[in-house]
Each structure stands twice: as structure tokens, then as C-alpha cells.
Image (cartoon, rainbow, N blue to C red):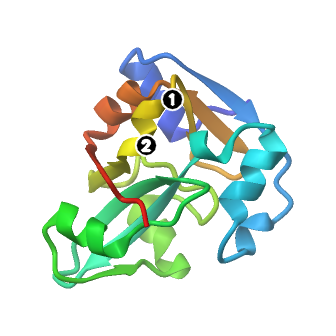
């Protein structure tokens, strides 16, 4: 398995994780439901699989949100958590230039820049969670507190 930038960052920080591979068959082209399908493919509960959503505020600040695969982000709660008036999703075509990652392989760890990151508080209900390793076909399994620490994330209620 090739090391991704996210894995190298975790190795450098001496944070324990394991990598899990899955067959990527392009399901990431779906607008909704790809994370749930991924959880099913891995044989895990969608509550423990966290997707990464990159958004932009009215002031053009890029913000990162992580939510479990079985839920959508409540944009009103996300705006409140970030202290912004407006939020809109970053276009897939902009994702690579902003984060260094493509849609379906976007990890909250190791983006090109350090963006403010918010993780739904449901993350604390798990011993370990799955996040993208930074490329399609690979996931990182990590303790929630380690994910919070390495991303510098704020933990907040983002549930719809």
C-alpha cells in the first residue's frame, strides 16, 4: 500500500492508525450516498465512517467539515460553529487545487493548507473511525481523539 500524505503526517506525529483498502468503482460520482456505500463495502456501520466536506464562506474562507456517512451536515449549525453568515460547497473542480485531494479521496488530514476544521460530535461515540486516506480506494482507521488532535478540529453538533 502506497503511503499517502495523510499517512505520512500521522507517522511523523507518531499517531497510531491502520490503513484499509477497498475497490473503488467510481461510486464517488454520486452526489449523495457514496459514503454510505463505502461503509457497506467495508462492512462497517455508516456512523463510524466520516466523510469530508469542503465549503467556502461569504468571505471566501475555506472550511472543512467532517460528518458521519449516515448524516448530512446542518448548514445552519455549520455556519454558527464557524461564525460565518454563508456557506456553500466548494466545486469538485476546485477541490484538488485547494486541498491537494480529489472528490471521493479528500482527507481532513494533510491538505495543502491548514483550514479550520469542524467534526461532528458523534465522532466521540466511537473507539475508532474511518476517514479517507487521501486517495480513492483507501481509508484510515483512527481513534477520534487522535483525528481531532492532528486536524486541530473543533468538535461540534453538525447533525441535520
* Vertical side of 17 occupied by 21: above or below: below
Q: Are marks 1 and 2 in contact (CB under 8 Å)?
A: yes
Give residue 148's position: percent from left, percent from top.
Answer: 33, 35
Residue at the image position 65 percent from the left and 39 percent from the top? 139
Query: Marks 1 and 2, how far apart in space?
Result: 8 Å
Q: Secondary structure at mark 1?
A: loop
Q: What number of labels is visible?
A: 2
Nearer to the camera, 42 or 73 = 73
Give residue 131's position: percent from left, percent from top.
Answer: 56, 42
Residue at the image position 35 percent from the left and 74 percent from the top? 75
Give residue 31's position: percent from left, percent from top.
Answer: 66, 77
Q: Secondary structure at mark 2?
A: helix
Quarter of the image for residue 19 reads: top right
Residue at the image position 40 percent from the left and 51 percent from the top? 111
The N terminus is located in which quarter? Answer: top right
Estimate how packed mark 1 is, as few (under 14), some (14 to 19) or many (20 or more) residues with alpha carbons within 10 Å: few
Nearer to the camera, 100 or 49 = 49
* Vertical side of 112 occupied by 44: above or below: above
* Vertical side of 74 occupied by 99: above or below: above
Nearer to the camera, 142 or 155 = 155
The image's mark for residue 126 is 1
Give residue 40's position: percent from left, percent from top.
Answer: 80, 47
The answer to whether residue 9 of the structure is visible from this angle is no
- Residue wearing tag 2: 122
- In the shown orientation, is residue 39 left or right of residue 62? right
- In the shown orientation, is residue 57 left or right of residue 51? left
Quarter of the image for residue 160 reads: bottom left
The image's mark for residue 17 is none
Nearer to the camera, 8 or 37 = 37
- In the shown orientation, is residue 71 left or right of residue 150? right
Estimate how packed mark 2 is, as few (under 14), some (14 to 19) or many (20 or more) residues with alpha carbons within 10 Å: some
* Vertical side of 62 occupied by 107: above or below: above
Amino acid at each position: 500500500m502506497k503511503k499517502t500524505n495523510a499517512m505520512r503526517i500521522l507517522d511523523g506525529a507518531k499517531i497510531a492508525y491502520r490503513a484499509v483498502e477497498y475497490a473503488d468503482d467510481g461510486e464517488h460520482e454520486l452526489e449523495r450516498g457514496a459514503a454510505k456505500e463505502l461503509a457497506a463495502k467495508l462492512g462497517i456501520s455508516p456512523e463510524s465512517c466520516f466523510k469530508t466536506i469542503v465549503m467556502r464562506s461569504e468571505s471566501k474562507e475555506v472550511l472543512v467539515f467532517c460528518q458521519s456517512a449516515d448524516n448530512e451536515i446542518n448548514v445552519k449549525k455549520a455556519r454558527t460553529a464557524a461564525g460565518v453568515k454563508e456557506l456553500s460547497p466548494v466545486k469538485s473542480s476546485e477541490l484538488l487545487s485547494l486541498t491537494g485531494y480529489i472528490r471521493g479521496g479528500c482527507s481532513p488530514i494533510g491538505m495543502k493548507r491548514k483550514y479550520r476544521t469542524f467534526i461532528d460530535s458523534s465522532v466521540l461515540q466511537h473507539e475508532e473511525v474511518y476517514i479517507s486516506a487521501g486517495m480513492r480506494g483507501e481509508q484510515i482507521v483512527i481513534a477520534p481523539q487522535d483525528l481531532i488532535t492532528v486536524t486541530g478540529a473543533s468538535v461540534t453538533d453538525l447533525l441535520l
